[in-house]
Image (cartoon, grey):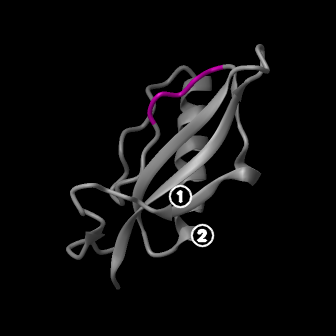
Amino acid sequence: MRLRIYEVDVPIHDTRHPDRHGVHVFTGVADSPATALRRAHEVYDAALAAHTAGLEIPGKQPDSWGARGLRPGWQLEWPAAKASLWNDPVSWTVRNDFAL
């Protein structure tokens, strides 16, 4: 299986200041855009749960996905999330030595 690095862009807004918005970006290895979206959502949910419980946010997972830069008070708009191949200027978009 040939895995590629994907980028998942999730619109985000500040629940206290509606005029403040942006994009939260996740990157990691996946076999499809659907898998990339699923993994991004899973690692975000794990990071949010850890933060809410007062625990350290988990680091990168063995499949390269992770969540950093959690912003309390900001809401991610998952239905509007988009996944695509990561456009790396150094062309490191394929990882052949990775096995699930």
Whether 45 is drawn above or below 84: the answer is above
Location of the C terminus by quadrant is: bottom left
Location of the N terminus by quadrant is: bottom left
Which span is picked out in magenta?
A: 68-72
Q: Is residue 41 left or right of residue 66?
A: right
- Residue at the image point whose x is 61% and y is 42% from the top: 45
Give the amino acid at mark 1. Arg
Give the amino acid at mark 2. Ala
Question: Could you say which is closer to the camera, residue 37 or residue 43?
Answer: 37
Q: Check residue 71 for magenta coloring.
A: yes
Whether 72 is drawn above or below 2: the answer is above
Query: In the drawing, what numbered circle is on residue 39?
Result: 1
Residue at the extreme front: 89
Query: In the drawing, what numbered circle is on residue 89?
Result: none
- Residue at the image point whose x is 77% and y is 14% from the top: 16
Q: Quadrant of residue 51?
A: top right
Residue 84 image position (x, y, % from top left): 51, 64
Query: In the drawing, what numbered circle is on residue 34?
Result: 2
Q: Which mark is nearer the camera, 2 or 1?
A: 2
Residue 15 image position (x, y, % from top left): 77, 21
Q: Is residue 45 left or right of residue 78?
A: left
Residue 81 image position (x, y, % from top left): 66, 52
Q: Please tell me whether mark 1 sits on a helix, a strand or a loop.
A: helix
